[in-house]
């Protein structure tokens, strides 16, 4: 039954996003592994030959820069890291292109920052460009713009996992494959003999979250935490995710065959519109709205809009039209949405019935503080 599910997921996937991290692409020395890039190019060609459109989110610019500049160790200074990434990015794309040309395909480089996906117009432009590149038969290769993005270079794991998830939701890609340096999600420390691979995850609940958290400190361990968050984003949007070992030769062919490779995260029942995907996962929230239990239930279980009556407090100085986090009394994020009112106005009408808004503000342009069409449930 599990293999049939995987076969169906692959068979119905039109666009597939692959995410490859630095550990998969580099040798123990930190240098770029050209042999592995060649293998990935061969495997991506197999996906394209199967009729799939493929987009790659790839790290590795620093490793490529180290190889080019003859550096034996990864620099620790930020400016030097960005310089090495600038040198390496061209070499990384050149390596991919050289390997892909053997299959009659060219690489297309896309460098993004968070702001590119935060702004709605730029977000749509990125989407249109990617779809045009796919129509030209190229293979888009996306990376964080390391030469201008500080956070990516100074963290050890995670940013490109989230980037891959955001690209997947942007394209409504049916399947995201994240390559890790382990076989998938384990129910314990992968280095311990008693830990077992989790083949399928239907809901990313507290139990699943506990698999990547230290039981004493509660802190996330390693790169699997960011991969789990990426899986949560994509499955919430209604698509599937597979986390598999990127060092395993032929892993993509095994996924094509529907074999039980890695950990499969199945989509949630609900599906989000393109606007809701942007609101929920790409746009940067400008403030927070705290709601009561009744409002939480109406939003998460009944598909209702957020009314002033269910709001108990606000945080931040957001304006009308800004994206806001919607949280319960315990500050747990349950949704994001476009606010029809500014923070100051919401403070004045919170807890009131919609019929009283005009009495307090002198006008009532909207009955809802956040309309359900402009709201994305991302938790709860």
Image (cartoon, rainbow, N blue to C red):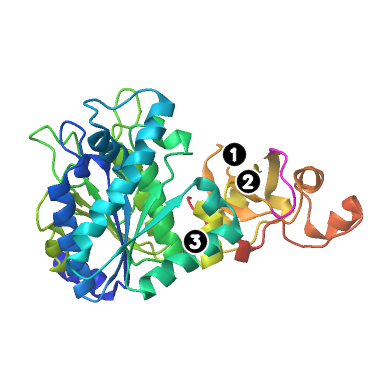
Q: Mark 2 or mark 1: which comes first in sequence?
A: 2
Residue 379 at x, y = what percent?
A: 47, 50
| Residue 248 location (% of width, % of height) | 11, 50
Residue 380 image offset from top left, x and y in percent? 48, 50
Q: Is residue 122 above or below residue 291?
A: below
Residue range in magenta is 315-321
Going 17% across and 68% down the picture, which residue do you hit? 46
Is residue 226 part of the magenta span, yes or no? no
Residue at left offset 78%, top offset 55%: 353
Q: Residues within 10 Å of mark 1 (few under 14, many from 20)?
A: some
Is 269 in front, or is 235? 235
**Residue 292 disc label:** 2
Please identify, in this view, whether the residue under mark 3 or under mark 1 is nearer the observer: 3
Q: Is residue 43 visible?
A: yes
Residues at discs 2 and 1 in contact (Cβ within 8 Å) = yes
- Of residue 119 and residue 143, the one placed in the foreground of this image is 143
Disc 1, SS: loop
From the image, tell me which residue sits under label 1: 329
Say whether residue 143 is left or right of residue 261: right
Q: Which mark is residue 126?
A: 3
């Amino acid at each position: 039954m599990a293999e049939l599910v995987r076969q169906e997921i692959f068979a119905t996937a039109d666009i597939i996003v692959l995410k490859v991290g630095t550990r998969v692409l580099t040798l123990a020395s930190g240098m770029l592994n050209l042999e592995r890039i060649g293998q990935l190019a061969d495997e991506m060609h197999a996906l394209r030959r199967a009729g799939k459109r493929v987009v790659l989110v790839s790290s590795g610019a620093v490793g490529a820069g180290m190889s080019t500049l003859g550096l034996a160790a990864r620099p620790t200074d930020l400016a030097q890291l960005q310089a090495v990434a600038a040198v390496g990015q061209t070499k990384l794309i050149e390596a991919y292109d050289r390997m892909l040309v053997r299959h009659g395909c060219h690489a297309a480089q896309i460098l993004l920052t968070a702001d590119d996906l935060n702004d709605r117009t730029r977000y749509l432009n990125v989407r249109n460009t990617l779809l045009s590149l796919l129509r030209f038969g190229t293979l888009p290769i996306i990376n964080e713009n390391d030469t201008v993005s500080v956070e990516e270079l100074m963290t050890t794991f995670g940013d490109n996992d989230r980037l891959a998830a955001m690209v997947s939701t942007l394209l409504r890609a049916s399947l995201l494959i994240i390559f890790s340096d382990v076989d998938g999600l384990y129910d314990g420390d992968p280095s311990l003999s008693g830990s077992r691979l989790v083949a399928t995850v239907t809901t990313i609940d507290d139990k699943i979250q506990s698999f990547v958290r230290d039981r004493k400190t509660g802190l996330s361990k390693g790169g699997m935490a960011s991969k789990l968050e990426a899986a949560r984003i994509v499955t919430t949007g209604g698509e599937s995710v597979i986390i598999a070992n990127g060092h395993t030769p032929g892993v993509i062919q095994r996924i094509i065959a529907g074999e039980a490779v890695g950990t499969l995260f199945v989509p949630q029942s609900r599906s989000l519109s393109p606007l809701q995907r942007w609101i929920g996962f790409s746009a940067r929230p400008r403030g927070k709205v705290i709601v009561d239990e009744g409002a939480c239930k109406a939003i998460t279980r009944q598909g209702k809009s957020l009314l002033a009556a269910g709001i108990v407090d606000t945080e931040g100085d957001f304006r009308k039209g800004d994206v806001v986090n919607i949280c319960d009394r315990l500050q747990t994020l349950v949704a994001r949405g476009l606010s029809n009112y500014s923070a100051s106005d919401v403070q004045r009408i919170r807890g009131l019935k919609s019929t009283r808004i005009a009495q307090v503000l002198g006008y009532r342009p909207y009955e809802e503080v956040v309309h359900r069409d402009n709201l994305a449930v991302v938790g709860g």
